[in-house]
């Protein structure tokens, strides 16, 4: 049975239930009794939870649990009830027709009374629409959540010489959180997988000199991130190849360059890669910000993804593609440091599909099908892996098969040395001690702390400072609160006792004095310490 038409001006929306009072919508009048044109109420409601609230919000069904109406095993299913009442009595006849009219990806309808269709394995199948006979003016059915967030609208109608409609909305999960720490995917729109360089005369081959790309950004539950007010994806062409150096990015008719900012729509950011004059691999870095889903204000907590596209300087030979070439290579990774490399191939028909043929990658690293090896290695050592690459010849032309080539890839995981060091006076790197600039009596002391290596971002802490010095953490400076005095020198008092009746003589001697304090430098996850030392010189000062 088909769904009946919606009468203009006769629909009232609600979340938990819809009551349609047809007397106000121009439905037939008449007296009580069995008049078939008498106004009636049509309601659609969800079951009520133990706390008295309607069950119109369901969690994401991430484990693909089947429909179930028990309190324990049925959190992803809600029962729906449709009623038709005329003159305070159930309608005497008619069929209810119910369908999901919005949000098909959010869930499905089930009878759960033995009438659901089944597949060849005797599993009940989901439905977009169902038909239910009115029993005492009522019927019930079920909505079951999927693993996609959103809101489904369900509409029911009843034929009783009039068209009557009721609707209900069921919300599944929460839509549009911030980007997941590891969930960005990039695909090329159109399926070509490669483009021609700008200096190739393409003729009428249909091969373009640009590729439209979409990067999908999802939250921790696999749902598309919300649409931002500005931009929430940054795409950059990495300077890793001649092809990349000549290529550019475009989006929306306004953004262009080597790096662009673009927004997502339903979690997808769309942009175009335009080739240059050089053939080869073009590496893209796609970034989102897990902190606030916004890249207009910079990136605080980066979520990154590497994508690869290819540019050819010739129109492929449709009957005999060039030989696919993949050579042995060695890469160096560092323990507990992020690693990312893209395997390289030439010839054949891009794009290329990569896999591990034999051996294992270092712990913490994974291989993407696009040839990107990424992750953070967690163990030292050397791994030799046989990698397999195949081209896409058979996907483009019906006669040749895909070419398949293997090569040995070696990845050496070594200890990480960031070169982090505290820089002392004269540019020397600190060891256990570090010489700072000396001080002089009569002059205030100021010493800026300096470092190199590491991540480039430094945090300092200082302890055991002399009483006349303080640490300015904002500017990383050691400074005195005043000009240094003779009292800050080594002060030696000597008393001589001559033979009486001579008076004892007291002599005060001021000499240069050495000072030291502990300096600790942190950069990323590394911390180093040294004892900083300087000498306070008298420099001819008159000390009394």
Image (spheres, rainbow, N blue to C red):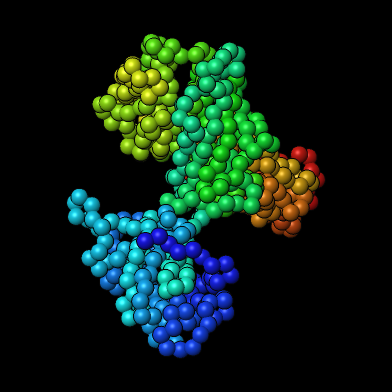
Left or right placement of residue 357 versus residue 57 in this view: left
Question: Height in image: 251 above or below 120?
Answer: above
Q: Residue furthest right?
A: 542
Residue 259 x %, y %: 62, 33
Residue 525 x %, y %: 48, 44
The image quarter containing residue 69 is bottom left
Left or right placement of residue 189 versus residue 325 in this view: right
The residue positioned 43% from the left and 11% from the top of the image is: 317
Residue 408 x %, y %: 32, 20
Q: Is residue 412 visible?
A: no
Quadrant that contains the N terminus: bottom left
Q: Between residues 225 and 136, which one lies in front from this camera angle?
A: 136
Left or right placement of residue 312 versus residue 54 in this view: right
The image quarter containing residue 362 is top left
The residue positioned 32% from the left and 37% from the top of the image is: 363
The image quarter containing residue 245 is top right
Residue 75 x %, y %: 33, 67
Q: Between residues 362 and 93, which one lies in front from this camera angle?
A: 93
The mark tally for this picture is 0
Question: Height in image: 148 above or below 354?
Answer: below
């Amino acid at each position: 049975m088909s769904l009946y038409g919606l009468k203009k001006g006769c629909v009232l929306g609600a979340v938990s239930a819809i009551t349609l009072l047809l007397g106000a919508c121009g439905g037939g009048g008449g007296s009580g009794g069995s008049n078939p044109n008498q106004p009636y109420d049509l309601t659609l409601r969800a079951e009520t939870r133990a706390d008295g609230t309607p069950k119109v919000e369901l969690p994401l069904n991430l484990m693909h649990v089947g429909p179930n109406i028990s309190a324990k095993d049925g959190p992803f299913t809600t029962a729906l009830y449709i009623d038709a009442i005329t003159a305070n009595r159930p309608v005497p006849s008619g069929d209810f027709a119910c369908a999901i009219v919005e949000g098909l990806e959010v869930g499905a309808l089930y009878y759960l009374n033995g009438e659901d269709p089944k597949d060849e394995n005797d599993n009940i199948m989901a439905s977009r629409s169902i038909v239910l006979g009115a029993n005492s003016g009522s019927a019930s059915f079920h909505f079951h959540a999927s693993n996609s967030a959103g809101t489904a609208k369900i509409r029911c109608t009843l034929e009783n010489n009039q068209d009557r409609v009721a609707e209900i909305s069921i919300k599944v999960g929460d839509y549009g959180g911030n980007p997941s720490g590891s969930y960005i995917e990039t695909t090329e729109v159109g399926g070509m997988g490669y483009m021609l360089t700008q200096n190739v005369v393409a003729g009428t081959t249909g091969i373009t000199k640009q590729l439209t790309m979409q990067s999908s950004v999802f939250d921790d539950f696999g749902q598309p991130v919300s649409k931002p007010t500005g931009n929430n994806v940054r795409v950059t062409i990495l300077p890793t190849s001649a092809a990349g150096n000549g290529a550019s990015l475009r989006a929306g008719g306004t953004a262009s360059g080597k790096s662009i900012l673009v927004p997502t729509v339903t979690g997808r950011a769309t942009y175009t890669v335009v080739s240059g004059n050089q053939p080869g691999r073009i590496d893209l870095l796609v970034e989102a910000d897990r902190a606030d889903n916004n890249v207009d204000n910079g990136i605080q907590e980066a979520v990154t993804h590497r994508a690869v596209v290819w540019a050819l300087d010739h129109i492929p030979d449709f009957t005999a593609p060039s030989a696919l070439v993949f050579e042995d290579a060695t890469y160096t990774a560092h323990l507990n440091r992020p690693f990312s490399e893209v395997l390289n191939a030439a010839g054949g028909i891009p794009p290329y599909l990569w896999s591990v043929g034999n051996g294992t990658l270092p712990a913490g690293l994974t291989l993407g099908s696009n040839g990107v090896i990424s992750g953070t290695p967690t163990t030292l050592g050397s791994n030799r892996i046989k990698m397999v690459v195949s081209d896409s010849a058979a996907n483009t032309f019906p006669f040749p098969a895909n070419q398949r080539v293997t090569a040995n890839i070696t990845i050496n995981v070594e200890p990480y040395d960031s070169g982090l060091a505290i820089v002392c006076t004269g540019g020397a790197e600190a060891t256990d001690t570090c010489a700072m600039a000396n001080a002089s009596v009569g002059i205030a002391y100021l010493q800026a702390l300096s470092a190199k290596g590491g991540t480039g971002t430094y945090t300092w802490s200082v302890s055991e400072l002399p009483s006349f010095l303080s640490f300015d953490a904002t500017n990383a400076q050691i400074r005195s609160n005043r000009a240094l005095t003779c009292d800050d020198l080594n002060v030696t008092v000597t008393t001589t006792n001559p033979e009486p009746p001579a008076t004892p003589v007291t002599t005060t001697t001021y000499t240069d004095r050495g000072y030291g304090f502990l300096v600790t430098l942190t950069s990323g996850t590394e911390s180093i310490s040294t004892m900083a030392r300087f000498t306070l010189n008298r420099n001819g000062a008159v000390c009394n």
